């Protein structure tokens, strides 16, 4: 099973921006996530077509399970 932490923000252009982080620490807390997200907004280091980050919108961990099939292809 693969996990991805998704940090969701609102931007200055009124859009949504999502940052995905592979293999997050197993025991993240809400406080840990909020602290990082607040720093990302305060440092203002991300500015793209959707604008700068202005507010936290959400956060979630997505679990993904991949099953591969052996098709005998080399």
Image (cartoon, rainbow, N blue to C red):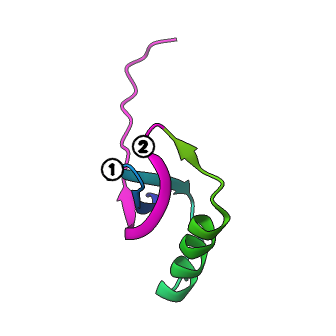
Q: Is residue 20 magenta?
A: no
Tell me if residue 30 comes above or below residue 3 in the rendering.
below
Q: Which percent across, then down, holds residue 46?
A: 59, 50
**Label 1 secondary element:** loop
Query: Can you identify the residue that label 2 sits on?
Result: 50
Quadrant (top left/top right/bottom left/bottom right) for the N terminus: bottom left
Name the residue rendered at 37%, 20% in the picture: 71
Q: Earlier in the sequence, mark 1 or mark 2?
A: 1
Can residue 5 be seen here? The reply is no
Query: Can you identify the residue that label 1 sits on?
Result: 15
Q: Which percent across, then down, holds residue 66?
A: 38, 45
For the residues labelled 1 and 2, the Cα–Cα distance comes to 6 Å
Q: Is residue 61 magenta?
A: yes
| Highlighted range, magenta | 49-74
Quick one: 11 or 1, which is closer to the camera? 11
Q: Which percent across, then down, holds residue 32?
A: 57, 83
Name the residue rendered at 36%, 31% in the picture: 69
Q: Quadrant of residue 41?
A: bottom right
User: Which labelled disc corresponds to residue 47?
Assistant: none
Q: Residues within 10 Å of mark 1 (few under 14, many from 20)?
A: few
Quick one: 32 or 42, which is closer to the camera? 42
Q: Which percent across, then down, holds residue 31?
A: 53, 88
Q: Residue furthest front?
A: 12
């Amino acid at each position: 099973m693969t996990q991805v932490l998704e940090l969701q923000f609102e931007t200055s252009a009124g859009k949504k921006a999502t940052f995905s982080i592979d293999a997050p620490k197993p025991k993240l807390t809400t406080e840990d996530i909020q602290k990082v997200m607040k720093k990302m907004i305060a440092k203002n280091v991300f500015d793209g077509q959707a604008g700068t980050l202005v507010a936290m919108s959400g956060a979630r961990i997505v679990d993904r399970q991949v099953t591969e099939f052996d098709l005998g292809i080399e």
